[in-house]
């Protein structure tokens, strides 16, 4: 067996992870109770692009962390690499679970067969209960052994059952030890490979027992292995009791009710749920399981205000679980309640910026306040130092001029003294404890200067997005989409999803639709775009109009494509979709304008892109040929606040019509599609005067299948939602 490489790294789907390793690091075999993570000198890159460089990753047991940073900085990639066991030095005994935009990700403890076991006709409650792979495996093993022990017709059934069960366990242990042996070197690596050889021998012996003819099994063996089966069944039952398996259904119901499901809704088929409610169901599945480290990526997406409040309390109650939540991006606020949630659940903050991980004991609001105060303080200190240095340099120039003119040696000594003073006193004037700076205490070691430089915190540059703004001429006037008394219901449904809806969208108009999850917003989009056929009423489209829709499943579709083609890049996908309409240069320009420049577009696999970057690629696929009507269904879900603002700015100049579907997270932002295009200060109004302006827009509320115009826009809907907050979020 070849020795593993000395540099500990993992490379999957273009993701390369390296970290400092030594003989003192521990894995599951060495410290099975280890529940903390302490990784030094962590480097993370995707497609040759660095995301982390010489960073330190520290997660203390039972602490709650909030990880913040801009889209594309590597937040999702970091916690995904952590969940998949790609980071060297992480204890193998840790049971970690990641709930991300693409579903569940777990390490070696997840049984892939059970994870893939999903029944199309399962109810919401069954879907959540089956998500716990450990419990499902234990139940399956208990049922398997119980049936074998109760089989009176075949006395050898229990022998086959216990041998099959032992073989499966040995195989899983062998696979685990294979990974450990590949990660170790030196004396520990030699021991791991020795243990691996022993495990392989046990697997071979187990295969021989499985192939043993029934006629060769004697009575002593039957008695011995039957007793072993009974003892194994007792151990499984004990583990199920430790998992509180008997109360699993009650626990699952509690989680589902907290996230807004009604008692009737949890008994409905999972396949009948809308995209937002499926997200809630996935979140319930993650919260249902008992793990050591729970990683939640964008966990508040598609959640109503009551559900966020409940989730906040539930996460705070997880006192025996380490939780890492990807929170709202800094420094801008994505929404008030997203910020409140992150502030409430955070014991500590992890900030990913400039390829490093910064740690702060406190929440995001406190971090930003202290960072702002520190920036202001250090800026003033630097300004005062610059003023003092400028004065000293001026006196040096005067003294040097006088010395040359008079030949006074004392003046030259003054010049040398003042130059030395500049060198010695330039830098931080305050020590570690807030007192006066002291060289041997506050700047230990060898340095080229006597004082530390004043390090003013940098500000992230503004996000810029550019898209094609002018659709082709329609040649003759008319509405782009018109719905006249349209009604729609799904087969087998007792009630109509859409009831007598009238909606007309003309070129250049801005239309927003708000409503609760499950109210039928995505169904209405399907009717407007022609994906669904109305049961009653008429839907007409302009014969020359080009309609494109960004739906809730656009990112999921990209993820499925990337799984089928591991080498799929953003540039390759856009060139394929455009089918020759775009040259490579034009495709690169479009992707760059959306925030996917250079090698990120051509070299980084789609699977390695963040959720926000996948949103940008999905938008590029829609707008490469400018549509007359662009439908955006929950487009801001995976985008950070700065990118959302940049998208709003660029859509101001978009001359096509916009249909924006929002849920109540956008309600809390207090912005409607029309309001977003109208906001500008006086200077901007002067600049855009005479340019194309969007037509006045309107916001509708979808309630009980009907559209109702809101005169006050999204602010009106916000007030309605707050008044009805005790009833909001229940799936009827």
Image: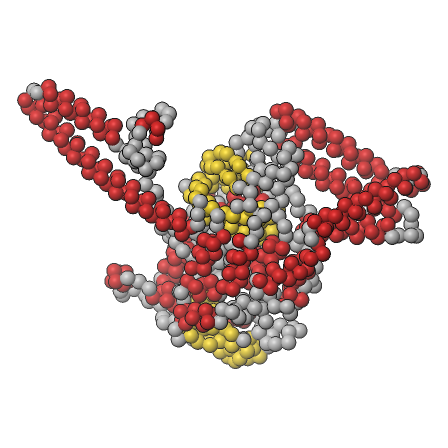
How far across and down, in percent of the image, does residue 425 sit?
25, 30
Q: Is residue 473 above or below residue 234?
A: below
Q: Is residue 152 above or below residue 678?
A: above
On-image quarter of the N terminus:
top right
- In the displayed structure, does residue 363 sit left or right of residue 303? left
Q: How is the image coloured?
A: secondary structure
- In the displayed structure, does residue 221 sit left or right of residue 496? right
How far across and down, in percent of the image, does residue 189 sit?
64, 27
Residue 80 found in image quarter: top right
Residue 227 found in image quarter: top right
Q: Nearer the viewer, residue 296 or 690?
A: 296
- In the displayed structure, does residue 543 sit left or right of residue 263? left
Q: Nearer the viewer, residue 427 or 168?
A: 427
How far across and down, in percent of the image, does residue 311 sit?
54, 58
Residue 117 in view in this figure: no
Residue 177 found in image quarter: top right
Q: Tell me how many marks there are.
A: 0
Residue drawn 63% across and 35% down? 31
Residue drawn 51% across and 69% down? 726
- In the displayed structure, does residue 580 sit left or right of residue 10? left
Residue drawn 58% across and 62% down? 258
On-image quarter of the C terminus:
bottom right
Residue 422 in view in this figure: yes
How far across and down, in percent of the image, does residue 524 sit?
53, 71
Q: Nearer the viewer, residue 495 or 38?
A: 38
Residue drawn 51% across and 64% down? 306
Q: Of all residues shown, which one is farthest toward the left?
A: 406
């Amino acid at each position: 067996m070849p020795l593993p490489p000395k540099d500990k790294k993992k490379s999957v789907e273009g993701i390369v992870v390296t970290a400092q390793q030594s003989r003192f690091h521990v894995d599951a075999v060495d410290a099975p109770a280890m529940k903390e993570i302490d990784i030094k000198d962590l480097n993370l890159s995707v497609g040759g692009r660095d995301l982390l460089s010489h960073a330190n990753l520290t997660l203390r047991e039972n602490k709650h962390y909030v990880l913040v940073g801009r889209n594309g900085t590597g937040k999702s990639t970091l916690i995904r690499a952590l969940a998949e066991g790609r980071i060297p030095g992480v204890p193998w005994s840790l049971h970690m679970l990641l709930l991300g935009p693409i579903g569940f990700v777990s390490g070696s403890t997840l049984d892939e067969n059970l994870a893939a076991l999903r029944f199309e006709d399962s109810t919401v409650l069954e879907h959540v209960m089956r998500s716990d792979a450990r419990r499902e495996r234990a139940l399956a093993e208990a049922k398997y052994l119980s049936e074998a022990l109760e089989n009176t017709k075949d006395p050898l059934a229990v022998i086959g059952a216990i041998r099959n069960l032992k073989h499966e366990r040995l195989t899983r242990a062998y696979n685990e030890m294979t990974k450990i042996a590949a990660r170790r070197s030196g004396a520990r690596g030699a021991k791991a490979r020795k243990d691996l050889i022993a495990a392989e021998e046990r697997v071979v012996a187990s295969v021989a027992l499985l192939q043993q003819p029934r006629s060769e099994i004697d009575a002593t063996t039957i008695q011995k292995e039957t007793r072993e089966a009974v003892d194994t069944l007792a151990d499984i039952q004990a583990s199920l009791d430790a998992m509180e398996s008997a109360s699993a259904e009650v626990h699952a119901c509690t989680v589902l009710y907290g996230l807004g499901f009604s008692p009737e809704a949890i008994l409905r088929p999972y396949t009948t749920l809308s995209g937002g409610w499926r997200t809630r169901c996935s979140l319930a599945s993650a919260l249902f399981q008992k793990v050591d480290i729970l990683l939640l990526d964008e966990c508040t997406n598609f959640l109503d205000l009551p559900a966020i409040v409940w989730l906040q309390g539930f996460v705070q109650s997880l006192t025996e679980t380490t939780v890492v939540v990807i929170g709202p991006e800094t420094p801008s606020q994505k929404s008030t309640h997203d910020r409140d949630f992150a502030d409430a659940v955070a014991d500590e903050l992890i900030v990913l910026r400039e390829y490093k991980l910064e740690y702060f004991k406190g929440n995001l609001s406190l971090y930003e306040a202290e960072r702002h105060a520190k920036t202001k303080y250090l800026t003033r200190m630097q300004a005062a130092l610059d003023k003092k240095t400028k004065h000293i340099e001026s006196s040096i120039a005067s003294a040097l001029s006088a010395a040359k003119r008079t030949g006074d040696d004392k003046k030259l000594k003054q010049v040398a003294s003042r130059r030395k003073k500049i060198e010695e006193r330039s830098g931080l004037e305050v020590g570690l404890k807030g007192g006066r700076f002291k060289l041997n205490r506050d700047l230990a070691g060898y340095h080229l200067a006597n004082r530390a430089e004043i390090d003013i915190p940098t500000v992230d540059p503004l996000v810029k997005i550019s898209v094609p703004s002018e659709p082709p001429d329609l040649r003759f006037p008319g509405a782009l989409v018109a719905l006249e008394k349209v009604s729609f219901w799904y087969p087998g449904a007792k009630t109509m999803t859409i009831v007598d809806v009238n909606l007309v969208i003309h070129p250049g108009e801005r239309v927003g639709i708000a409503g609760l999850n499950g109210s039928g917003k995505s169904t209405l989009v399907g009717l407007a775009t022609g994906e669904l056929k109305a049961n009653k009423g008429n839907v007409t489209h302009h014969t020359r109009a080009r309609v494109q829709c960004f739906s809730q499943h656009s990112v999921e579709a990209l993820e499925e494509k990337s799984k089928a083609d591991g080498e799929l890049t953003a540039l390759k996908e856009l060139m394929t979709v455009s089918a020759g309409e775009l040259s490579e240069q034009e495709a690169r320009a479009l992707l760059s304008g959306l925030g996917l420049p250079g090698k990120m577009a051509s070299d980084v696999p789609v699977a390695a892109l963040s959720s926000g970057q996948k949103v940008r690629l999905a938008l590029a696929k829609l707008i490469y040929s400018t549509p007359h009507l662009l439908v955006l269904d929950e487009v801001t879900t995976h985008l950070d606040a700065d990118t959302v603002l940049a998208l709003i700015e660029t859509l101001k100049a978009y001359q096509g019509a916009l249909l924006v579907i929002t849920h109540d997270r956008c309600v809390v932002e207090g912005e409607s599609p029309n309001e977003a295009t109208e906001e500008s200060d006086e200077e901007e109004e002067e600049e855009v005067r005479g340019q194309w302006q969007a037509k006045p827009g309107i916001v509708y509320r979808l309630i009980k299948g009907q559209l109702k115009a809101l005169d006050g826009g999204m602010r009106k809907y916000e007030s309605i939602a707050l008044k009805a907050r005790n009833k909001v979020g229940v799936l009827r």
